[in-house]
Amino acid sequence: MKPAAFDYFAPKSIDEALALLAQHGYDAKPLAGGQSLVPTMNFRLAQPAVLVDLNGINELFFIRENSAGLRIGAMTRQRTVERSPLVQRRAPLIHETMPHIAHPQIRNRGTFGGSLAHADPASELPVLAITLNARMRVQSSRGERWVNASDFYLDLFATDLQPDELLVEIDIPDLPARTGWAFDEVSRRHGDYAMAGAAATVTLAVDGTVAAARLVYLSVGDFPTEAFLAETALIGERPTSAALAAAAEIAATQDISPGGDIHASAAYRRHLAKVLAARVLARAVDRAVERSAERGSA
Amino acid sequence: MNHPITLTVNATEYTGTVEARLLLSDFLRHDLDLTGTHVGCEHGVCGACTVLLDGAPVRSCLVFAVQANGRQVTTVEGLSTGPRPEQMHPLQTGFWEAHGLQCGYCTPGILMSIVPFLEENPEPSEAEIREALSGNLCRCTGYQKIVEAVQMGARLLRESRV
């Protein structure tokens, strides 16, 4: 229950961190909030030879808004995101989801980008990134690139990040007009990893039919799972409870193939996926209707 | 490789040299003899090792001591003003009076989670208290007495400030 020995570096700038990652390659791990990495090191499941601690890099801690949405620095603490009025206003889906992530003691330390880069299949933030069409700004000593969240997650705990690359910033575009959002999950105890969870956004056309829908799951596969068939089934439909129930049925039976483990059987995960889809889609539709009305009266 | 660190624990400055892999929990207990911080699961689940890092509750088993360099740490030993019962923090008095513990192993972590919680929310509802306690595991009490102890502690804290 004690970590194996490692070399420790605490760079003060992104450039310094990138140089260390370039130098040490596969042997190095960036240390963000440490709320997943340190437990795996304590168990010696992970034994990185080098840790590059990002906690001293001030330029990675920020939440900024621009005309198109939000930019969040990768090291921004989850608790800071949870309490940010800016996030509440510009990214209400993120604001609604943050309290579901572990406990305050974990969110005080855990970071926005750390969770996104760790890619735990039970984590909430990767699902939100995909639902919101977020883009990841990735840097290395070779240069920088932007990766769409939908292209970022490749497999269990595996992302598009190369060993010398660092996730530095996340771009979160505003929701389109007449769009509602919702997140929900089911866990055995508050703060536990969820057995299943879902995020949704629904955009209504002027005539009240569904113009666009997103439905993305956590904990029903090796990485965030988008319910493409269910989304497609909703397009052009009036968002009646029957239509939402039909979409939820499609999502749970055709879009996902969950595995079973000691926490939940595959059949139970499918059941949760259906119930959660119906809930989040209904809440997203309600909010889309509210926001459409607000716009109409404005 | 050893790293020199200087940090403030309970308003006292400490300087030492640590191996990078030394957890803050072990540094507090073994290097500083502050054994009030308990070590339970060592993977961030039980909350027994909760301390304040720059005022915010964190798991000290998930922070390396070297990361506390230049920072302020508060442990359970920092709550009271002295060794006598009347010098306890009002929340500690609440736990004493309302029997908020049996074996007491989880108690330091609970106190360090709830003290900052009561600073932000001096008059919490029972539901809010239970939510605030959810990051700390107790295997003795079934939590009922802990909730009552927090309620009493919150009242004593409010009264101490009027």
Image: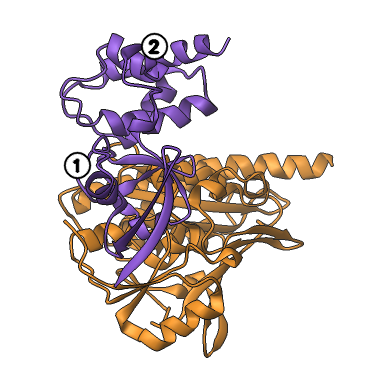
Q: Nearer the viewer, residue B11 or A179?
A: B11
Chain identifier of the orange chain: A
Numbered disc 2: secondary structure = helix
Q: Nearer the viewer, residue B53 or A252?
A: B53
Visual colour scheme: by chain
x and y, in percent, of residue A223 in the image: 35, 65
Q: Amino acid at mark 2?
A: Met
Q: Which mark is residue B152?
A: 2
Quarter of the figure with residue B130: top left
Mark 1 or mark 2: name the one nearer the start of the chain: 1
Quarter of the rendering occupied by the C terminus of chain A: top right
Q: Is residue A295 left or right of residue A219?
A: right
x and y, in percent, of residue A22 in the image: 43, 87
x and y, in percent, of residue A89 in the image: 68, 46
Colour of chain B in the rendered structure image: purple
Quarter of the rendering occupied by the N terminus of chain A: bottom left
Query: Pointer 1: what residue?
Result: B40
